[in-house]
Image (cartoon, rainbow, N blue to C red):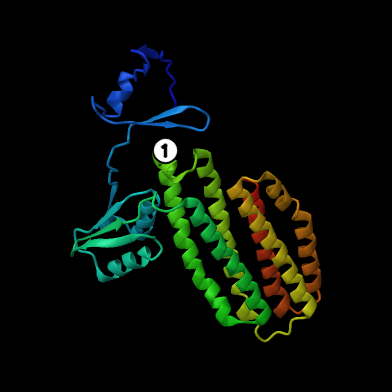
């Protein structure tokens, strides 16, 4: 629970101001004379004192006892997301080849994590990428562009019955997951270490907004995968032109909605965000028209293509969720 104390500002000499810090807080933080603390000015003018600051960034280490952890791969991911720099995986009985393979597979989802030491009973992982090394806003934009391209290719794969293109959409979802985990790590680290948020150029409020936004982008990619997975179900079906056109119409509307939403979020453009939200009736009408076009079609066509319509509807709603943050 937060505790507030009132302290009087004192002046010494000609221009130096002093403010004493609570003795109890100094003891709890383990600080002593000569230690460095960070003073961070927030957007509202409040001054934050961070006792965890040091001239050299401290290495955060986690230890996983593999014998007592059946879900050790999940623990690896969790520790990465919580900002640990070094993760040591230990086993008293020795790490099996199956466990080693599982560890290596889990690393495929984690950007910048490598095995730096390995023995019969211990594997040491290290994240070689500093949270402040990459621009969060640039990574969000990159992730969005991949997800948007996945949507376009998934719909094209439906239109052209292109299995190879559909499979490429599914494969790209792994890239989205890797970038998503990286951004979650950055945001959590920024929330826990305010000076890091200052380094990467975002405020605590923006951390919350971007956390919601990247989840929406990740969901867009998942919905595109679901669209791509319908291709093999319609390979032998003859789809009427009006059905295809109705799907393409929703696709165009959905793309415009989330494209505007991302721009509104990055630029903090409330007018553009409102424009995105105002497109919902147009989207709803297009979805209704698509379902009507499918109503008289065979089950072989109506079921998979109804799924496509539903996924595009959800993708457009992701755009609305992002626009709400701008």
Q: Quadrant of residue 99?
A: bottom left
Residue 155 visible in the current orientation? yes
228 horizontally vs 61: left or right: right
Q: Quadrant of residue 93?
A: bottom left
In terms of secondary structure, where does tag 1 sit? helix
Quadrant assignment for the C terminus: top right
**Is residue 215 or residue 121 the one in the foreground?**
215
Quadrant assignment for the N terminus: top left
Return the residue found at the far bottom.
Answer: 236
Provide residue 282's location: percent of width, then percent of height: 78, 58
Q: Looking at the image, is 318 positioned above or below residue 195?
A: below
**Is residue 48 or residue 238 the one in the foreground?**
48
Q: Looking at the image, is 102 positioned above or below residue 164?
A: above
Mark 1 closeness class: few <14, some 14–19, many ≥20 residues within 10 Å: many
Check disc 1 and report the residue beneath it: 194
Q: Report the residue at 27% width, 42% height from top.
A: 56
Q: Report the residue at 40% width, 52% height from top.
A: 81
Q: Report the residue at 53% width, 42% height from top.
A: 206
């Amino acid at each position: 629970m937060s505790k507030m104390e009132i302290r009087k500002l004192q002046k010494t000499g000609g221009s130096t101001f002093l403010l004493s810090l609570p003795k109890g807080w100094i003891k709890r933080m383990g600080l002593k004379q000569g230690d460095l603390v960070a003073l961070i000015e927030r957007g509202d003018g409040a001054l934050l004192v961070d006792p965890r600051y040091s001239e050299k960034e401290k290495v955060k280490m986690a230890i996983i006892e593999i014998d007592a952890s059946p879900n050790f791969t999940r623990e690896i991911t969790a520790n990465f997301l919580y900002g640990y720099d070094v993760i040591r995986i230990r086993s008293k009985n020795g790490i099996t080849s199956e466990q080693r393979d599982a560890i290596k597979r889990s690393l495929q989802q984690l950007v910048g994590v490598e095995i730096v030491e390995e023995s019969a009973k211990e594997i040491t992982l290290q994240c070689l990428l500093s949270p402040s090394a990459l621009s969060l806003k640039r990574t969000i934009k990159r992730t969005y562009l991949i997800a948007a391209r996945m949507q376009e290719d998934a719909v094209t794969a439906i239109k052209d019955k292109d299995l190879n293109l559909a499979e490429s959409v599914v494969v790209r979802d792994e890239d989205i997951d890797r970038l998503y985990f990286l951004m979650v790590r950055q945001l959590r680290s920024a929330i826990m270490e305010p000076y890091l948020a200052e380094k990467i150029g975002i405020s605590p409020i923006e951390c919350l907004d971007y956390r919601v936004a990247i989840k929406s982008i990740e969901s867009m990619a998942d919905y595109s995968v679901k669209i791509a997975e319908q291709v093999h179900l319609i390979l032998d079906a003859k789809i009427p032109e009006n059905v295809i056109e109705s799907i393409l119409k929703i696709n165009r509307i959905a793309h415009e909605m989330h494209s505007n939403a991302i721009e509104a979020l990055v630029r903090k453009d409330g007018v553009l965000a409102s424009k995105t939200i105002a497109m919902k009736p147009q989207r709803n009408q297009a979805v209704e028209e698509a379902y009507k076009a499918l109503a008289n079609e065979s089950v072989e066509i109506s079921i998979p293509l109804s799924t496509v319509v539903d996924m595009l509807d959800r993708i457009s709603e992701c755009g609305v969720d992002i626009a709400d943050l701008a």
